[in-house]
């Protein structure tokens, strides 16, 4: 590109330069020898003319030029920066081009000045630039700031912008709240104020592992208040006072179900209620139902209490009795002979349940047809029961009734003969408690007693026996000498 020339008469008559050419200076700086706007070579400070190509200068540039010259008289304007790729030339008086300075790199952009406070703002100096193409005219990049007019404080110098700090890593919030990143407002998830989200409760401590129950162990039943248990036990025991076996069955069934619900299936008191229900069912005429029920109760009792527990053995005693009543006397005998040794070992030979097992064994043996053996077993058992349990014990009356039923059959099997005193008292006891299904059966039994003892008119004597008299006293009154 040819050097850009300035007309020689633009700034008036300029003397010839007597010094070598001024070395290139950085834009926006002044020479130390510059005084009152004159440079060392006698040229004005703005003598560095930057002429744009003719085709790029619009017509509006000529209109604003006078205004630019007038503004230059009031304010010190910076020298234009040398655009890259453009050669500058300084002309002297003769119009000879001066040596072109070597191109210098443009300085780095200065930071943007800080905004002026909103107090009384000074008048703004407006610099009109020529509407030239990009890269021509005064350049803001690298130029010093415009000086304010006299009387106004200088604008504060711009501080360099602080380096951009990297965003801190996202902090982990409380449990249950997503982590919030310290990003700019409007970017990423909105931080949650600390007071709006309640911290999650600390995790509960791990419960101690429950030890595994041993194989075959019975689960524990619900814990019921002692008053509830006591009430249910009293209701169970009142079934013995029911007027009929059917009424006892109805009461015991309700109590047993309630006990199972409140105390558990394997509770000892609940199992005892089911055992009594089976016994009353057998007495009410349902021995088959009693056998089925007592079999289940015996299995549960053996699992919960143990096969050798006295309550378990008592359930098996009731089951053996029901078996004999249901038509399986041999099964009853087998079960009773299996239970008796365990009862004697657990309770002793003279315990009520051990002695009761012997009475039921004799009854089952009689059902098998061995009347002689059964009769002899009962004759030996009744005195033992009276001695160890007392004459008023229920087992004494039960054994006497069983022996009294066997007397007629035993006498027929034995061919008659005398009647032992124990058997005679057993027959009188049966008459006193009226252990008969009908009056005809009672009359036949009274006749058998007269034949066995040789007494007549025993019915009148029986009627004269007071109610408070025991079986031994009644037998002495009826069978004694007149």
Image (cartoon, rainbow, N blue to C red):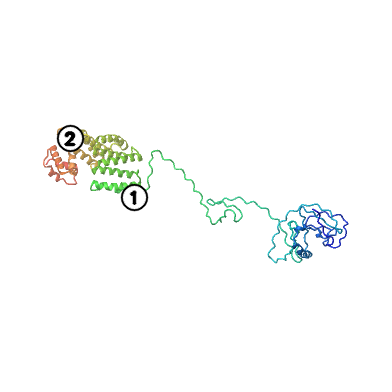
Most extreme residue toward the front is: 55
Q: In which quarter of the image is the C terminus?
A: top left
Residue 370 is left or right of residue 34, and the answer is left
Q: Where is residue 372 in the image (x, y as percent from the top left)?
A: 20, 33
Looking at the rendering, which quadrant does residue 218 occupy? Answer: top left
The mark nearer the N terminus, 1 or 2, is 1
Q: Nearer the viewer, residue 252 or 134?
A: 134
Q: Vertical placement of 63 versus 89: above or below?
A: below
Label number found at residue 281: none
Q: How many marks?
A: 2
Label number found at residue 228: 1
* Element under disc 1: helix
Dot 2: element: helix
Q: Where's residue 288, x and y in %?
A: 26, 40
Left/right of residue 115 with respect to residue 379 in the rendered view: right
Residue 248 placement (x, y as % from top left): 26, 47
| Residue labelled with disc 2 | 410
Measuring from the top left, give residue 338's x and y in whole percent: 29, 34
Is residue 61 visible to the viewer in this orientation of the structure?
yes
| Residue in the picture at 26% in, 43% down | 281
- Cα distance, mark 1 to mark 2? 50 Å
Q: Residues within 10 Å of mark 2 (few under 14, many from 20)?
A: some
Q: Is residue 165 above or below residue 8?
A: above
Which residue: 27% across, 48% down? 251
Residue 291 placement, left or right of 189:
left
Q: Are marks 1 and 2 in contact (CB under 8 Å)?
A: no
């Amino acid at each position: 590109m040819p050097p850009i020339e300035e007309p020689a008469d633009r700034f008036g008559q300029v003397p010839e330069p007597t010094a070598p050419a001024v070395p290139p200076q950085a834009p926006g700086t002044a020479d130390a020898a510059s005084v009152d706007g004159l440079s060392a070579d006698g040229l004005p400070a703005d003598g560095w003319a930057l002429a744009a190509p003719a085709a790029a200068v619009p017509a509006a540039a000529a209109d604003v030029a006078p205004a630019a010259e007038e503004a230059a008289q009031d304010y010190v304007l910076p020298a234009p920066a040398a655009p890259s790729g453009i050669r500058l030339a300084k002309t002297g008086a003769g119009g000879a081009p001066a040596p072109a300075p070597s191109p210098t790199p443009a300085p780095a952009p200065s930071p943007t000045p800080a905004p002026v406070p909103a107090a009384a703002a000074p008048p703004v100096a407006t610099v009109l630039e020529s509407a030239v193409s990009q890269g021509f005219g005064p350049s803001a990049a690298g130029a010093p700031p415009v000086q304010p007019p006299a009387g106004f404080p200088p604008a504060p110098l711009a501080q360099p912008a602080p380096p951009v700090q990297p965003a801190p890593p996202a902090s982990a919030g409380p449990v249950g709240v997503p982590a919030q990143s310290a990003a700019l407002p409007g970017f990423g998830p909105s931080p949650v104020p600390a007071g709006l989200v309640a911290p999650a409760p600390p995790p509960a401590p791990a419960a101690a592992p429950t030890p595994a129950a041993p194989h075959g162990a019975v689960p524990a039943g619900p814990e019921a208040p002692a008053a509830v248990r006591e009430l249910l036990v009293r209701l169970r025991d009142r079934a013995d006072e029911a007027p009929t076996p059917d009424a006892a069955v109805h009461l015991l069934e309700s109590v047993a179900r309630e006990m199972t619900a409140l105390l558990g299936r394997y509770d000892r008191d609940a199992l005892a209620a089911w055992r009594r229900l089976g016994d009353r069912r057998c007495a009410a005429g349902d021995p088959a139902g009693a056998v089925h029920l007592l079999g289940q109760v015996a299995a549960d009792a053996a699992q919960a209490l143990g096969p050798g527990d006295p309550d378990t053995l008592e359930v098996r005693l009731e089951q053996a009795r029901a078996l004999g009543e249901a038509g399986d006397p041999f099964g009853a005998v087998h079960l009773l002979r299996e239970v008796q040794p365990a009862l004697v070992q657990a309770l002793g030979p003279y315990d009520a349940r051990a002695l009761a097992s012997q009475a039921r064994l004799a009854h089952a043996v009689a059902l098998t047809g061995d009347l002689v053996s059964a009769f002899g077993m009962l004759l030996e058992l009744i005195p033992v029961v009276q001695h160890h349990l007392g004459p008023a014990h229920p087992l004494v009356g039960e054994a006497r009734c069983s022996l009294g039923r066997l007397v007629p059959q035993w006498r027929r099997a034995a061919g008659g003969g005398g009647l032992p005193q124990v058997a005679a008292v057993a027959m009188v006891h049966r008459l006193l408690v009226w252990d008969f299904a009908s009056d005809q059966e009672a009359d036949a039994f009274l006749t058998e007693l007269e034949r066995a003892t040789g007494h007549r008119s025993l019915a009148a004597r029986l009627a004269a026996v007071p109610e408070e008299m025991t079986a031994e006293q009644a037998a002495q009154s009826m069978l004694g000498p007149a």
